[in-house]
Image: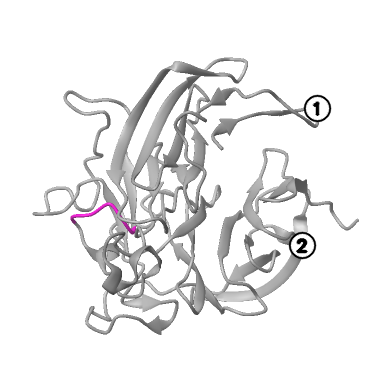
Amino acid sequence: AGTVRMIVDDELSEPVLDLRDVVVPELEWGLLGLVFADDGAHAYLNETDGFETRIHEFSVAADGTFVADAGRVVYRFDQPADAHNGGDLLIGPDGYLYVFNGDGGGDRDDEELGGAWNSDLDRRALALDSPLGKILRIDPTPVEGAEFGIPDDNPFVGVDGALPEIWAIGVRNPWRNGFDTETGDLWIADVGNFQWEEINRAVAGPDGTDAGRGVSFGWSAWEGFHRGNDDLPAAGHVLPAYEYAHGELGCSVVGGTVYRGDRFPELTGRYLFGDYCSGSVWAMGVGDDGVAVDVTTVATLPFLVDIAVDADGSILVTSIVSGIHELVPSS
């Protein structure tokens, strides 16, 4: 509904930020993402009313409360339909703000294409003139004449017709993503269309940065390892580390992060992810060829929407129905 709260001594606080007069919690809309700057002095939120997505910045006081009257909109763009909003935000190893955008679904007013629920005919995720179906990378610090800056090494800076804030392309609905805190690799859980869910991995450079720079993750030329729109080029895309079919395993992937804590040593170096429909939470490794190995179930939580690891190495999983749960080590 648009509130941000803290958990203190296992109790939910009063809102430290209340955006209920702005946020519209319908369909796939609402408050979809939140990330803190590394120094904790600012927070960034992603929210949409279905017609426009807005990235907000707020100052954060020492007690954790947000300074609501010091907020500003850093970035905004139109949404063509009701679905595939993405909404995740991350601060990268380079200190920049990464914005994960879905392809927006079909066109709201185009009944011939099935309206908002059609996506298999949509090709905007590979178009460089749209923020939809992209990962953006921006410097949220205001610059002269703009609310944000463009890092000079963004891959499409100076490319005719391209938005310079684009970092990577070809995602459908990236729902929960993470940087490996040890390697800097970027992991993306991309919700599929009608058949396949996928996990993408972009390898960082030797200094732990640049993961995903200029990469196409393939949508909608590909869905998982399977050819999508055959009028789009088949070459030039990075295929997933893992896919699974709709059915018993689920129907809507939820990403997490690579586990680097001490509480679950058997999970160290393995990527955590799950599925909203089945509620399964999995851990997986990756072989030398970049393809998933040893995918195992570690928990089940119906209506799963988030997987996180805190500073103490605890694994927190969130259900949109039953709240936040902490995994307990088996011994």
**In which quarter of the view is residue 48 placed?**
top left
Which region shows up in magenta?
Answer: 129-133
Relative to 293, say whether 116 is above or below. above
Instruction: Indicate the amino acid at tag 2.
Output: Ala
Marks 1 and 2, the one that precedes in the sequence = 1
Q: Is residue 300 magenta?
A: no
Q: Which mark is residue 299?
A: 2
Q: Alpha-carbon neighbours of circle 1 within 10 Å: few (<14), some, or many (≥20)?
A: few
Residue 140 visible in image: no
Marks 1 and 2, how far apart in space? 24 Å
> What's the residue at 67%, 23% (across, down)?
14
Mark on residue 239? Answer: none
- Residue at 76 percent across and 61 percent down: it is 266
Is 130 within the magenta?
yes
What quarter of the picture does the N terminus occupy?
top right
Vertical arrangement, residue 120 with respect to residue 298, above or below: below
Which quadrant is the C terminus positioned in?
A: bottom right
Q: Is residue 238 left or right of residue 326?
A: left
98 relative to 103, above or below:
above
Return the x and y of residue 277 as percentages of the image width and height. 64, 67
| Element marked by disc 1 | loop
Residue at which label 1 appears: 9
